[in-house]
Amino acid sequence: FTFLLKIVTPYKSMFKYFKAKTGEVMIEPLIVHPKEIIKLRSTLKLFIRDWAAEGKAEREMCYTPILNALTEYFPKTEENKKKYLEGITVLLPGAGLGRLVYELAKLGFKAQGNEFSYYMLLSSNYILNNSSKKEEFEIQPLIHSFSNVYSEDSPFMKIKIPDENLSEELFVSETGEMSMVAGEFVQVYESQLNTWDSVVTCFFLDTANNIIEYVETIHNILKVGGLWVNIGPLLYHYSEMENECSIELSWNELKHIIQGYGFEITKEENKTCTYSSVENSMMQTVYKCIFFTAVKKE
């Protein structure tokens, strides 16, 4: 609870609040819709995936192939030294809690995350800008769920975050930079034509109402020769929502559209990934993800 208060305290002017006798700022209770509570619980659980040692295996499943693809395409050679100094730009829409943006910056890229969810934005802002040491915070992100557990102690599991000293690690890279931008991806970036060296989509494409609009935007904002790296399933988020447009393409259909926009798909693989799974849970969600790299040719 204290951790959540720390996240929202900088924005206390948006809420009715008072100071307790202990000096802590207390937000007055609000009437909250159940779906917002679900979003908050999901965000807390994602701290395991992105910022705890317990999430390392899951990060290696989906982040490592992306990082490897980028370092292969933009190798740190003498020939590329000038490019790194000028800034090789990488955009990550759907950045979530910011771990992949941070990893890209550590590798020397000028990385920018884009996120729409306030839960993700406020939480990532706090962990990225207010963490001063490794394992500074201790939280219990599973405490709201008592389903599918082997032990009665499992929901009370404590994790320490972040698993690295963020400021210390970022200073290791001479060229790495990171930033976060709030807003809906297409609206924010549709005018940034031929701007980005690379776009990374990680568990993101299926968040679109119209996935073709995402493909078009990515094509438009990439420079010619720019690299698009993707990993994730096609679990279309709006498919069962009433009064919502949802264009649901198979991978073969989507691949054809990507190529039709002027991309050359240079790598295509299936990779097994979990998403926000907990090792000691009786339920594990496993996705057979499409991992591909594509280069903008025209």
Image (cartoon, rainbow, N blue to C red):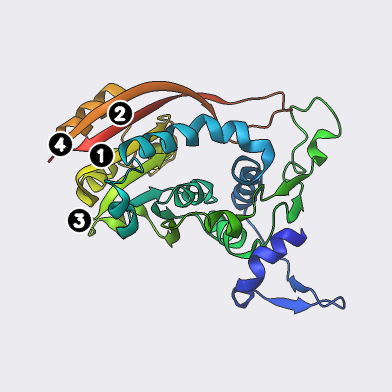
Q: Which of the two marks, 4 or 2, is nearer to us in this view?
A: 4
Is residue 69 or residue 2 the one in the foreground? 69
Q: x%, y% of residue 31? A: 67, 62
> How far apart are the alpha carbons under marks 4 and 2?
19 Å
Is the residue under label 1 in contact with that under label 2 (CB below 8 Å)?
yes
Q: Quadrant of the C terminus?
A: top left
Q: Which residue is mark 2?
A: 249
Callout 3 environment at 10 Å: few (<14), some (14 to 19), or many (20+)? some
Q: Residue type at mark 1? A: Ile
Tell me if mark 4 has few (under 14), some (14-19) or many (20+) residues whose alpha carbon lies within 10 angstroms of its own.
some
Q: Give me the residue at 49% from left, 50% from top.
A: 106
Q: CA distance from mark 4 to mark 3?
A: 15 Å
Please report whichever mark, 4 or 2, sits nearer to the chain's N-terminal start. Answer: 2
Q: What secondary structure is marked by label 3?
A: loop
Check disc 2 and give the amino acid type.
Leu
In this rendering, the answer to whether 142 lies above or below 292 is: below
Considering every residue shown, the one lying at the far left of the view is: 298
Q: Which residue is disc 1 drawn over?
A: 212
Query: Residue at 61% of width from left, 48% of height from top?
Result: 43
Residue type pointed to by label 4: Gly
Instruction: Find disc 4 in the rendering and name its residue.
Output: 262
Cα gap from disc 2 to disc 1, whole angstroms:
9 Å
Is tag 1's residue or tag 4's residue first in the polypeptide sequence? 1
Regarding mark 4 in the picture, which secondary structure is present there?
A: loop
Amino acid at pointer 3 = Leu
Q: Are marks 4 and 3 in contact (CB under 8 Å)?
A: no
